[in-house]
Image (cartoon, rainbow, N blue to C red):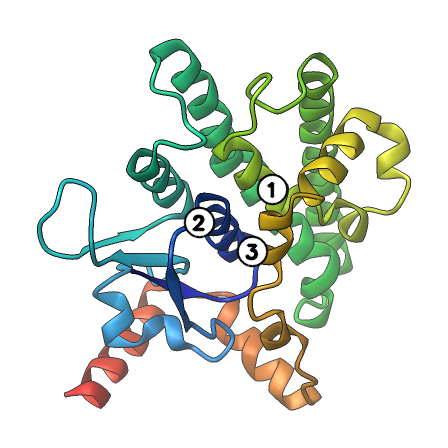
Amino acid sequence: MIDVYYWPTPNGWKVTIMLEECGLEYRVHAVDIGGGEQFKADFLRISPNNRMPAIIDNAPLGGGKPLALFESGAILEYLADKTGKFLPKEPAARYTVLQWAYWQMANLGPMMGNANHFKNYAKKIVDDEAQLTYGTKRFVGEVDRLCGVMDAQLGANRYLAGADYSIADMLSWSWAMLLEKLIDDAVWSKFPNLKRWVDEVGARPAVQKGRNVHKEWSERQLTEEQEKARREILFNQTNDKVRNAREEAARASS
């Protein structure tokens, strides 16, 4: 059994999709990132970066005591090695997949996250219109560039790393499926190969099931005060704020 520490976001979906694709048994533990649960002492022992997702594999690859892992890319790579699925063993094919997996971790995810922040959240907490305009243009523009990278790759290949579906697709799909909401519906007319891939991967039963794990958690109706409190927790984190939250969590659990 694998314990999954999760909230329904693109990074959380990566892990539940992979678990569904591999047919592994798992149980979900909520980490309400807007409620500050990522700073609880018990969670920090699993994920010292105070970010979800994270897992504990109670029957780990190679045996031994339960294994805790954080970072979605590392988790998917581990699960692929554990099950022998979605990551080839042959070196050339393996590293072709891994380069696209790392591309997502370093590029698509962070850039889409930043673009979403400036386009949809920053206007609620930043008064400087010039700062908002620059941030939106910078990150939405970079997302546009990355869409071009994917579209060209998918014009020559069925999947991101070639002919076979892999962890690279799961990692990237969880973000790419949100492009229409982040930019607009015209994004698909610009990138038809990317649209074909988003639809094809999204039609997989395991992807649909993993994507919908506890989606009701993110669909709760909140008051403006509740939303403001959650934004304060999520954004503008500093070392001092994080350290204070950790110390409070440690005191509360002692």
Left or right side of 242 for 10: right
Disc 1 residue type (three-letter): Met
Which dot, 2 or 3, sits closer to the camera? 2
Q: Nearer the viewer, residue 107 or 204?
A: 204
Residue 153, x across and y down, in percent: 67, 18
At horizontal 53% and vertical 40% (from top left) the residue drawn is: 171
The answer to which image quadrant residue 49 occupies is: bottom left
- Of residue 128 and residue 199, the one placed in the foreground of this image is 199
Q: Position of residue 172 (x, y in %)?
A: 58, 38
Q: Answer whether residue 145 is visible to the viewer in this image.
A: yes
Kindly state the secondary structure of the residue where label 3 is placed. Answer: helix
Q: Earlier in the sequence, mark 2 or mark 3?
A: 2
To which residue does mark 3 refer? 210
Identify the residue at horizontal 68%, vertical 65% (top origin).
121
Q: Which mark, by number, is residue 23?
A: 2
- 172 lies above or below 190: below
- Residue nearer the viewer, 191 or 115: 191
Please give the label number shown on residue 111: 1
Q: Are marks 1 and 3 in contact (CB under 8 Å)?
A: no
Q: Is residue 68 left or right of residue 55?
A: left
Residue nearer the viewer, 145 or 54: 54
Amino acid type, callout 2: Gly
Q: Indicate the secondary structure of the residue bearing disc 1.
A: helix
Q: Nearer the viewer, mark 2 or mark 1?
A: 2
Q: Secondary structure at mark 2?
A: loop
